[in-house]
Amino acid sequence: MKGVARSGFFGRPGFYGRMVVGMKISHIIGGVLDTVVKVVLIAVIVVYAYKYALEAYNFGYRVFAEEPVSNSGSAKVISIYIPENATAMEIGEVLEENGLIKDARLFLVQELLSGHHDELREGKYELSSDMTPEEMIKVLTADTGEGEEEAAGTSAENGGASGEDGTEDDAGDGTNEGTEDGMEDGMDGGDGTLEGNGAGEEQQ
């Protein structure tokens, strides 16, 4: 028994001690690896969070401060047609395809936050590449019908006024002509009376 006790665990000197040390080393290595993995994951999350936060900031900034696609010197005017019941996203895609804006998604948010939400109208529009998205939204939501009605109303008023002036002028001309004719007849009658009186005097 004493010899077995001196020979160590399972009859091999120091086996238990080496096993304990090995377990401790494995535990330490596992802990270090676990810590490294956690640090790497946190770093990746921080990098991606910063990246997307920066993109979100830039996107939000562009919503209110987006510059035109081109300056006035190199601007081009493009004619587009907006179909009936077209969504803001669909209109934004049309504008992006024609080189009038940079991002259809940005146009969607701009239209949503503008004072003209859900007011985009069907029709044909002339837009310039030196216009900001905000200016384009104002054009696309303008009530062109009211302008046409006002123009038509103004033309009708002018036409009515001209007709009234013509009637008054015609009536005035008729009155003047009647007066002139009456004066001529009176003068002729006067001449006849004078001639009659003259003949009567000669007979006497």
Image (cartoon, rainbow, N blue to C red):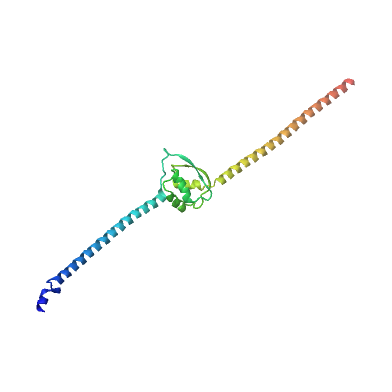
At x 36%, y 52%, the residue is 55
Q: Which quadrant of the figure contains the N terminus? A: bottom left
- State the residue lying farthest toward the top: 202
Rendered position, 154 above or below 64: above
Q: How many marks?
A: 0
At x 43%, y 51%, the residue is 105
Q: Nearer the viewer, residue 10 or 160?
A: 10
At x 11%, y 74%, the residue is 7
- State the residue lying farthest toward the bottom: 1
Image location (x, y in percent) of residue 123: 53, 45
Image location (x, y in percent) of residue 154: 60, 42
Rendered position, 5 above or below 147: below
Image location (x, y in percent) of residue 151: 58, 42
Instruction: Decide if residue 84 is on the left or right side of residue 109.
Output: right
At x 33%, y 54%, the residue is 51
Rendered position, 177 above or below 8: above
Q: Which quadrant of the figure contains the C terminus? A: top right
Quadrant location of residue 39?
bottom left
Instruction: Decide if residue 107 is on the left or right side of residue 153.
Output: left
Image location (x, y in percent) of residue 153: 61, 43
Q: Nearer the viewer, residue 139 or 184?
A: 139
Rendered position, 41 above or below 167: below
